[in-house]
Amino acid sequence: RLAEAVPRLAGLLAEPGHVTGAAAALGAIATPAAFSALRDAALSPGRPVRAPVFDALLSIDPRRAADVFLDMMGRGGSLGERKEAQIYLVKAGRRAAAAEICRALLDALPAAEPTLRLLYADALSELGGVGELRSLKEMFEKGDLSTRAALVKPIILISGDAEVARAAMASQSEAVRMRAMQALAALGDVEPLARSLRLTERLEKRPLGDVARLLGMYYGASVLVERSAAAAETVSVEEGASLLEVVERLASAADLRVEKGCALLLSREGWARAKVSGLERCRPLVSLVCKGKLLPLLRSAAAQAGLELRVDDEDLRKALATAAAPSGTLTEVPLAEALALLLGPGRRARREGRALIVERAK
């Protein structure tokens, strides 16, 4: 009966209204034929809904799923499709055979076109370890400027060395400098990146929370405003100012203070952080548009890291489901720091296997 069900379910993978259920069923069947049906659907161009298919591939065999995602990245398609495949490649590497996947990325990287090279390098930023660092450094020394721009980020994030980032910021290549500043922001120093980014159009008056989201989404640095200040009205700012100048001006107008870490943080009396344990300092990285309620935002952060959010305390779950999130954008911020900022005092988060547990602080 399972063998008979696979072709019918495979046909439903092309229908947006049925793909989620069909993919889940094939993931549960988990036969070679089911995996092949899911792989064929993943590699078919123009499919509007892919995430359920990718999730099912991961559930059956993360290592074989990684080969599918690598194939997708190399086949072309839109940048969005390639980026989605890269995100799932990283999820696969966190579950199985990260060293094999890193080797495949290192082998493919030199011949890749520039956009794909950046995607490969960013995957290595998340999955690579000391074993890959030597190869990356050798490639960096021998590579052209495009290769160096791609590789400087994983070298910095794997080593966790801010001095390497600051040395790279002296490069004559703007692309190398920018990637180094992005990596340095993930290490906890967003100021150089925020000073380098310039407002390219006039910023009109609007609520501060909306402005924080726009600045993060359009300019690529992380800006976060505490909940109580999100509705404050901002002043207009002319183009040409640095992102740091803009944020400091907006904060001054709303009588807020600015802290600089992985993000530019606007608050009334300083940003109180939650305690987080069991996660690396620099990785995994998550990107979040912060608005709405806190619980869905935490779920999104956990999912990006390949983890499942768990809140065993029912009262705490209800509180998180009704609490407003801070406003802004977090762009490639370490999960540990994102959780510390979002959860605030009185709560803590810890990793236990593939579970991300949120609980009351003790």
Image (cartoon, helix red, strand yellow):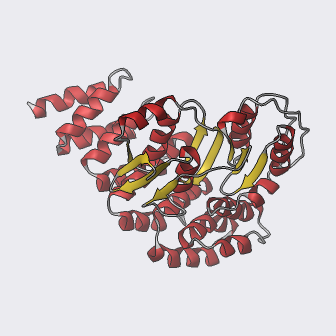
Q: Is residue 86 visible?
A: no
Q: Quadrant of the N terminus?
A: top left
Residue closer to the observer: 335 or 177: 335
Query: Percent x, y for residue 121?
Result: 55, 61
* Number of numbered discs visible in the structure rendering: 0
Q: Residue at x 52, y 58 (%)?
A: 120
Residue sitting at the far top = 17
Query: Percent x, y for residue 43?
Result: 38, 41
Q: Residue at x 68, y 34 (%)?
A: 228
Residue closer to the observer: 326 or 151: 326
Instruction: Give the side of residue 273 with respect to residue 357, left or right.
Output: right
Query: Percent x, y for residue 244?
Result: 81, 51
Residue closer to the observer: 75 or 87: 87
Q: Residue at x 83, y 47 (%)?
A: 248
Q: Residue at x 52, y 46 (%)?
A: 83
Residue closer to the observer: 141 or 90: 90
Q: Find residue 45 and report its image quarter.
A: top left
Residue sitting at the far left = 1
Q: Find residue 59 and report its image quarter.
A: top left
Q: Is 189 placed above or below 35 here? A: below
Query: Percent x, y for residue 18?
Result: 32, 23
Instruction: Give the side of residue 99 with respect to residue 246, left or right.
Output: left
Q: Is residue 360 visible?
A: yes
Q: Is 94 placed above or below 320 here? A: below
Instruction: Give the side of residue 142 with respect to residue 284, left or right.
Output: right
